[in-house]
Each structure stands twice: as structure tokens, then as C-alpha cells.
Image: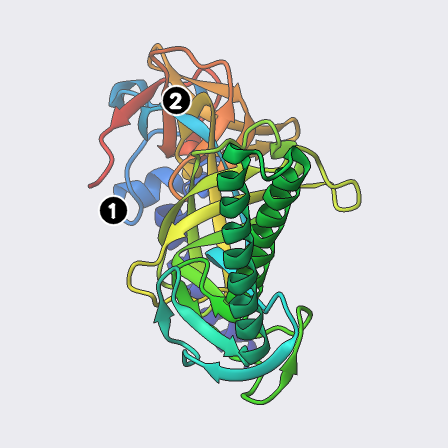
């Protein structure tokens, strides 16, 4: 007795599933037509009325309805773009490590770390009493040598001095001049001056320390603009050139893009890494960036022009990728080779005809040579 309710349930499910499949899965219509259910169901209004597959044209097209409806549009021509990203480090446009040229005891530091200085400003001074005394002594020696040379020049008019005496006096005068210049140079070396304008770094030495030419005092960096140094693969060596645009983003501020230009390209490929060293410059007028920061640098290279199609148009078969095109109001299968995938288009290599329309919707019902009706895509 339990079998009868179960059969009734199965019959009810079949009565609902068969008409529903005819509405949702058009491929079931030929099967319903073969078993003789399509026409009765269509007459009862349970399935959409239509012709059987045998009455349709090539590829399932209905000649009376104008062919298979598809959405298609003309292909575009776009340039092939090669985008390269690299990580680089920044340094100031100019940077100088400062140290004294002579040995002495540090007497004063005239700047504070982080302060801005102009070229020629005093950074630090050494004790210079001995150097000052040497300058004074040199001036006295020079004055004595000058008076001696002048006296001998007056005596030469009366023949009271010889030519040899005058030559020795001139030599002594010249020697005294050079000695004074050397003493003045040594005295000036006891003052450390800024060779460039920029910002002072940390001061390594303290007042009272004995320093020499190997003792670093501080570093001055001009960061009004920054130099980014990075490397690109050797395949791009012939494409990178001075003046090319770059986009830089500090790793610490990923949402901010800074425009820059390439200013220098190395003349050889590094054999170990097979890369080429490149330098670019970016502005830093607001002084928010610092030397030593890491940056992501992006370079875009424009190549040859190729057809571009919608990504939805790409189909795959046993022979590779292809697209359906509308050619003379009929469907044609066009093999392609994918060159580049972008956000909105795919650049391909294909033998398109100028009047070809690339199908993006309705490809499931297409067959080679099928009549098609092109409808406008929805906005």
C-alpha cells in the first residue's frame, strides 16, 4: 500500500520537472520532441512554443527569427604595455659626510641635529691657539723678508748690493709668503664649514673629544629632492632611458603616488643578478620624505599595437583560445593568441577583418556558419 503514494509523488515531481526543464534548459526540447511530449506540452501552454531542432537553421538558428541573437561589438586597437615594479632606496640629491682635515680637540659645535644650514655655515670648531700663533709668526717673518728685499733693491741702485743678495732676498720673501699661506690654511682647517645647503644629521663627537681626519662629525643631506636607486631586469636594458617617467610609492604610505623621472642609467649589466642599475629623482618640497626610505617604483613601457577584445569573448577549445566573430551576418570561429590581460581588455594576436564584430554574449548557441542577429549590449 505504501508503493502507491510513492508513485504518486514521483509522478507529481515529473509533471513539474519536465515543463520546468523545457523553460530553463533549452537543450531538453529535442529530447521532449523525440518522445512526443513537446507539442502537447506546448499546446497546453506548459512549455514555450517553438520549432524543433530539425526545423532550425545551422547552429540552432531560427531563420524566421533572424538568426541566433548575440551581443557583439567591434574590436579595438591598443598598445601593448609592459609594467615593471621594483623596490628601491632613497637618498638626498646631495649628501656629505663631514670630518676635520686636521687633528685637534673639539672646542664647539655650532649646529643642532636636524637643523638646516646654508653652504659656508660653521658646523664645528677645534682649539686653534697653536695654529693662530703659527699665523702670527708667519706674518712677522713675511714682513721682515719684505723689508730686506726692499732695502737691497734700494742699495742695488748705488751698487752696494750684489745680484746674488737680491736673488736670495726674493727667495726668502717668496718662502715667507708660502709659509704664511700654509699657516692660514691650517688655521682655517680648525673650522668645519658646510659645503652644501641641507639638513644636519646626528653629531657623533662631543665637545672636548680629540678628533682626527678619520673621525666623523656629522652628515649634511639636501633632501629638497630624492634620488631613488633601483634595478630592472636585463631584458629592459634597451628600453630604459634618461627622462622616462616613473611612479614611486613609499612603502610607509602605500596610497600616495609620486611622479618622477629617470636621471641616470648604468652602462653595464650586473653579471651576478642580471639586472641594470637605474636612478630616478622625485620631488620633496614639503620635506615629508627622508633619505633611506624604501619605495616601490613602477615603470610603464609602451610597445606595439594589437587588437583588444572583451575578456568575456575569450573561449577555449582543443586547439587553444578563440573568439566568435560576426562576419557577413554569420558566425565564424577566429583563433587567437593572448598577448596581455588588462583590467578591461585582452590584447590578442589574430587575423581579424576590419568589419568583424566580436561576440561577448550568446556564444553557447553558436556554430560555424550560423546566421546571427546582433543586439545592442545593455548599458
The residue at the far right in this view is 272
Above or below 106: residue 323: above
- The total number of labels drawn is 2
Asked if residue 66 can be seen in this view, the reply is yes
Picture residue at 33% right of the left edge, 65% below the top? 287
Residue at image mark 2: 55
Alpha carbons under labels 1 and 2: distance apart:
20 Å
Count neighbours of disc 1 (C-alpha within 10 A) and say few if under 14, some if 14 to 19, many if 20 or more. Answer: few
Judge left or right: residue 322 versus residue 175. left
Above or below 54: residue 166: below
Picture residue at 51% right of the left edge, 62% below the top? 139
- In this view, the residue in front, 266 or 190, is 190
Q: Nearer the viewer, mark 1 or mark 2?
A: 2
The residue at the far bottom in this view is 208
Residue at image mark 1: 45
Q: Position of residue 25 (x, y in %)?
A: 42, 46
- In this view, the residue in front, 259 or 301, is 259
Marking on residue 356:
none
Amino acid at each position: 500500500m505504501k508503493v502507491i503514494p510513492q508513485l504518486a509523488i514521483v509522478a507529481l515531481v515529473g509533471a513539474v520537472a519536465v515543463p520546468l526543464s523545457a523553460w530553463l534548459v533549452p537543450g531538453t526540447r529535442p529530447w521532449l520532441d523525440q518522445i512526443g511530449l513537446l507539442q502537447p506540452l506546448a499546446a497546453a501552454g506548459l512549455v514555450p512554443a517553438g520549432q524543433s531542432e530539425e526545423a532550425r537553421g545551422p547552429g540552432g538558428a531560427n531563420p524566421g527569427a533572424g538568426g541566433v541573437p548575440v551581443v557583439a561589438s567591434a574590436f579595438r586597437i591598443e598598445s601593448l604595455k609592459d609594467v615593471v615594479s621594483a623596490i628601491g632606496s632613497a637618498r638626498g640629491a646631495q649628501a656629505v659626510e663631514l670630518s676635520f682635515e686636521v687633528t685637534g680637540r673639539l672646542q664647539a659645535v655650532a649646529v643642532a641635529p636636524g637643523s638646516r644650514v646654508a653652504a659656508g655655515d660653521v658646523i664645528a670648531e677645534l682649539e686653534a691657539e697653536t695654529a693662530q700663533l703659527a699665523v702670527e709668526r708667519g706674518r712677522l717673518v713675511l714682513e721682515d723678508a719684505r723689508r730686506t728685499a726692499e732695502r737691497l733693491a734700494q742699495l742695488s741702485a748705488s751698487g752696494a748690493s750684489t745680484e746674488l743678495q737680491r736673488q736670495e732676498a726674493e727667495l726668502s720673501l717668496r718662502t715667507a709668503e708660502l709659509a704664511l699661506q700654509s699657516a692660514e690654511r691650517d688655521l682655517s682647517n680648525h673650522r668645519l664649514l658646510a659645503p652644501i645647503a641641507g639638513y644636519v644629521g646626528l653629531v657623533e663627537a662631543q665637545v672636548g673629544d680629540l678628533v682626527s681626519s678619520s673621525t666623523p662629525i656629522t652628515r649634511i643631506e639636501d633632501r629638497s629632492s630624492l634620488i631613488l636607486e633601483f634595478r630592472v631586469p636585463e631584458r629592459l636594458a634597451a628600453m630604459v632611458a634618461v627622462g622616462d617617467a616613473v611612479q614611486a610609492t613609499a612603502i610607509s604610505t602605500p596610497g600616495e603616488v609620486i611622479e618622477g623621472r629617470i636621471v641616470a642609467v648604468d652602462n653595464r649589466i650586473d653579471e651576478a643578478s642580471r639586472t641594470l642599475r637605474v636612478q630616478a629623482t622625485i620631488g620633496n618640497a614639503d620635506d615629508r620624505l627622508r633619505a633611506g626610505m624604501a619605495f616601490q617604483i613602477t615603470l610603464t613601457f609602451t610597445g606595439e599595437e594589437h587588437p583588444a577584445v572583451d575578456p568575456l569573448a575569450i573561449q577555449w577549445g582543443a586547439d587553444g583560445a578563440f573568439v566568435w566573430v560576426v562576419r557577413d551576418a554569420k558566425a565564424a570561429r577566429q583563433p587567437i593568441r593572448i598577448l596581455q590581460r588588462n583590467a578591461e581588455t585582452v590584447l590578442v594576436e589574430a587575423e581579424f577583418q576590419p568589419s568583424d564584430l566580436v561576440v561577448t554574449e550568446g556564444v553557447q548557441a553558436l556554430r560555424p556558419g550560423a546566421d546571427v542577429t546582433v543586439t545592442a549590449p545593455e548599458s
